[in-house]
Image (cartoon, helix red, strand yellow):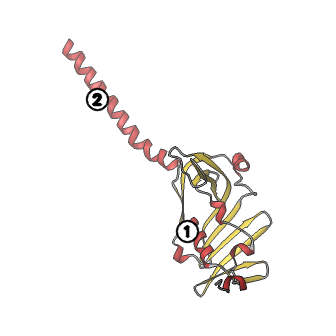
Amino acid sequence: MKKINNKILAIGLAVLVGIFVVSWIFRSPKLESNVRKELVNLDRTKITEVRISAADSAIRLVKVNGKWNVVKNDINVEADSAAVSRMLQTVQLIEATRMASRKKEKWAEFKVDSTATSVAVYYDGDKEADFQVGRFGFNQSPGGGGQFGQGMAPYTYVRLSDEDEVYIVDGFLGGMLHTGLNDWKKKTPTPADTTQVN
């Protein structure tokens, strides 16, 4: 009788372990897919245009014959290649650390609604990425010595334009996404820059 009870208990335990393992295998991919890590992944060598707009201001950065121009309203001038390169470095790979919300009602709170900075990236006229950059904040960094002061690590709220989910991304993305012409146009040296001081 005792042997039968032990056998039943062992079989019951094996069945429970089997159910747990099977449910873990089938549930795990779904749970992981709920939080997308890679939001934007671009080949910067293929990028030919970036459109940035915020409020009532917008600019276009356009690659022509290997050189970048900045276009705003009717003005089309050569862009500062270093500024464009820094921006491309920022937007070519955007990874989420976690999800902030799945609800459209939260967009305004995170400023990923109509108040966001909108960014669209193109390869030869084809849109490859389209996302909204919202407000930023700071986390207390456990090790200290963050980029913006002792223990301060910046983060930014980001939403892909065709999705409801809002994600948190490390860094201050908005700092590279200006819409002013002077932020992007190539700087011409002033006489003071070219004069050597003896």
Q: Is residue 18 above or below residue 5?
A: below
Residue 3 image point, x, y percent: 19, 16
Based on the displayed image, in which of its 4 quarters is residue 195 positioned? bottom right
Q: At x 40% / y 39%, what residue is drawn?
A: 24
Helix, strand or loop at disc 2?
helix
Give coordinates of residue 109: x percent, y percent.
72, 47
Q: Is residue 57 above or below residue 166?
A: below
Q: Which quadrant, please, contains the C terminus?
A: bottom right
* Residue reaching furthest to the bottom: 65
Which one is in front, 163 or 39? 39
Residue situated in front as seen by the camera: 26 or 152? 152
Q: Does the rendering let one see residue 190? A: no
User: In which quadrant of the rendered view does residue 48 lie?
Assistant: bottom right
Q: Residues within 10 Å of mark 1 (few under 14, many from 20)?
A: some
Q: Please state if 104 lies on the left or on the right of 17 as rendered.
A: right
Q: Which residue is mark 2?
A: 14
Q: Which amino acid, by three-letter code, is at mark 1?
A: Gln
Which residue is tagged 1? 89
Which residue is at a point 22% across and 21% down the rendered structure image?
7
CB under 8 Å between callouts 2 and 1?
no
Q: Quadrant of the N terminus?
A: top left
Element marked by disc 1? helix
10 Å crowding of disc 2: few (<14), some (14-19), many (20+): few
Residue plotted at (57% across, 55% down): 147
Q: Quadrant of residue 71?
A: bottom right
Mark 2 vs 1, N-terminal side: 2
Q: What is the three-letter code of the residue carrying label 2?
A: Ala
Residue placed most toward the observer, 101 or 58: 58
**Label 2 to label 1: alpha-carbon separation:** 52 Å
